[in-house]
Image (tube, coloured by chain):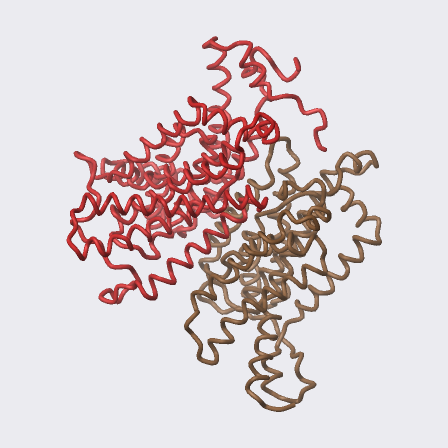
Chain colours: A red, B brown
Amino acid sequence: MANVSEPLSPALIGAAAVRGDLWVRIRRGAEYVAIPLFALAVSSVLFSVFLLALGKSPLEFFELVNRGGFGTAFSIQNTLQRSAPLILTALAVAVPARIGLIMIGGEGALVLGGFVSAVVAIPFVLGHAPPMVTLIVMAAMGTLMGALWVGLAGYLRHARGVNETISSLLLTYIGIAIMNFFVEGSLRDLTNPNKPSTMPIGDAYMVGKIPGTDVHWGLAAGIILAIALHILLSRTTFGFAVRVSGGNARAALAQGLPVGKLIVICCMIAGACAGLAGFFEVTAIQGRANASLVAGYGFTGILVAFLARHNPIAIIPVAIMFGGIVASGGLVQRRMDLPDATVLVLQGLTFVVLLVSETLYGRFKIFQVGGTADRT
Amino acid sequence: MSDSPFLIVLFAIIGGALRVSTPFMFVALGECLTEKSGRVNLGLEGTLVLGAMTAYATSYHTGSPWLGVLAAGFAGVFLGGIHGYVCKLPKVNDIAIGIAMMLFGTGLAFFFGKAYIQPSAPRLGSFSLGEWTGNPQIATALQVNQLLIVGIIVAFVMAWAFANTKWGLIVRMTGDSAPAAKAMGVSVDLVRFLATAAGGFLAGVGGAFLSLFYPGSWNQGLSSGQGLMAVALVIFARWKPLQCVVAALLFGAAGAVGPALQSVGITQGYYFFNAAPYILTLLIMIASAGSKQAMRDVPGELSITK
């Protein structure tokens, strides 16, 4: 092996010795903020070089992103609107990551969750059922669909040892194909000749805006879920069992923890989050299920989760930042004559740099207090 | 040779299978080489797309499709080289880097490729495996490209080299046990870097086939998961180059059934056939993962099956 004598994690050893010492904890925690910020700075520089090589001005680019994403009250609300699905799809990556899985099926769960929401609404809308009841049923079914979809990848991992990264991505392709099959086939709304879609749910059945803003309730749901999942993962026995299983599955099994069950539950929570994102995309933005659901939120969510180091609370600001980048895409495209894939290049580059920055942890003395690697 | 429609459709499926399977074959062979050295590169989907774009653009500008193939290979070396280099750093996860490289490669391809969606670039030529029948329809159905032959030769060379050469032994040893390789004085990082870069080259060539021969144009929907499926195929092929070829042909056949049925008027299952390759891949993964045979053949250092 590359590192035969890998020491025990210094954070674990140190934590016991210096628990309660606030200053030490701040210095420890600072590492997890400083290194991702450093990675962001490096990727911005690399992206600037990329733009310069193409004869475009990086200053103009970042200025436009700032203006398009955060410049006006309107753009901020637009940004928050786009952060809502990002928070939820990032949670769909972060929760399985806590148990040691790289699960990237958020896009598929979002698409299928939204699709199922739109489909179960049809009989309710036709029967003029109360909107509240309809929305609750839609949310429940969309969430359940997402939970089953990602849960399937978790089950295959647990029962058969199928690599969850590949299977969850395959399930995403399958999920999109399933939606297309129905949307362009038996469930197509024939009154809409332009774009194959399911029947529109109608304005009466749409989720409203948060009072006083132009932002839909998906943002509130995302923030509440992020806080709830943070408490679940960091402050409960369940969260502790998940962390132990993620750290060392064999030791967890020896302790009698139901590792397989925990894996499936984590994946179902993840899928439920992504499915809920799909529900909000349908009931707050699109009003129907169609190919617009395949907008890449699931993939941007992967990057958001990794940048936030799979911490549900940290996901909120990171998602808002990337919501701004996504929201400013149109402005950047028009003003700088750049293709829409510019945002993809920036995201891909940031992702690579961020993962490379993992190697920096534990290398800087300033963050090392108490137990260090040397002391083991 | 008779002119029976059945035979024509049969040959259409065979010809289609040979055409569809070629990119699968190259990506699977590239991944096979990388995984034999003990590393997983999940980013080959991005390599495939970037290779397709690079090949198309190069062919358009130089007028030489074969230069395009070469350029696609080097685009693959670029992405594979980044992957191979950064994965040697401690604490860097090769699977996560693969996802990032997939997004990065796709982003680069769409970014630079936008200008090449409209123009028409010179394609690769073809020859027919069916000339001997004297039947022009069969001869047309069995049109294939030289890259298919190249891919099969590469597979044989790889299989032979793994078994019989010093280099093959070094790659296998690095993949099975890094400490053993180190003890023999082999630089594990260098071997894996080279294996990932070379694997990227093969995947890039597979992308060139997509844009320059079949389907034979560049657009953003050119590849949707073929690279990923090919990576999954390697497990099914038990890390053996010749079995990679067989697995690729199987997938080519599965992919060719839909269009072949459509050509004779059966269109009902169109969207099902769209999803079929993904479902087939998933079923194959379920069947081959965790089996005792697979566990015996897996390179010992591989993180994907743990």
In the depicted structure, whether residue A168 falls above or below residue A213: below
Image quadrant holding the N terminus of chain A, namely: top right
**Can see residue B75?**
no
Q: Position of residue A293 (x, y in %)?
A: 34, 52
Q: Position of residue B121 (x, y in %)?
A: 53, 68
Residue drawn at x 60%, y 61% is B24
Q: Position of residue B72 (x, y in %)?
A: 60, 58
Q: Position of residue A151 (x, y in %)?
A: 45, 44
**Can see residue B288?**
yes
Q: Residue A277's image quarter?
A: top left
Residue drawn at x 52%, y 32% is A258
In the depicted structure, whether residue A284 falls above or below residue A30: below
Q: Nearer the viewer, residue A61 or A227?
A: A227
Q: How many marks?
A: 0
Q: Nearer the viewer, residue A113 or A370?
A: A113
In the depicted structure, whether residue B240 falls above or below residue B5: above
Image quadrant holding the C terminus of chain A, namely: top right
Q: Nearer the viewer, residue A244 or A101?
A: A244
Which residue of the protein is positioned furthest toward the bottom in this rendering? B2
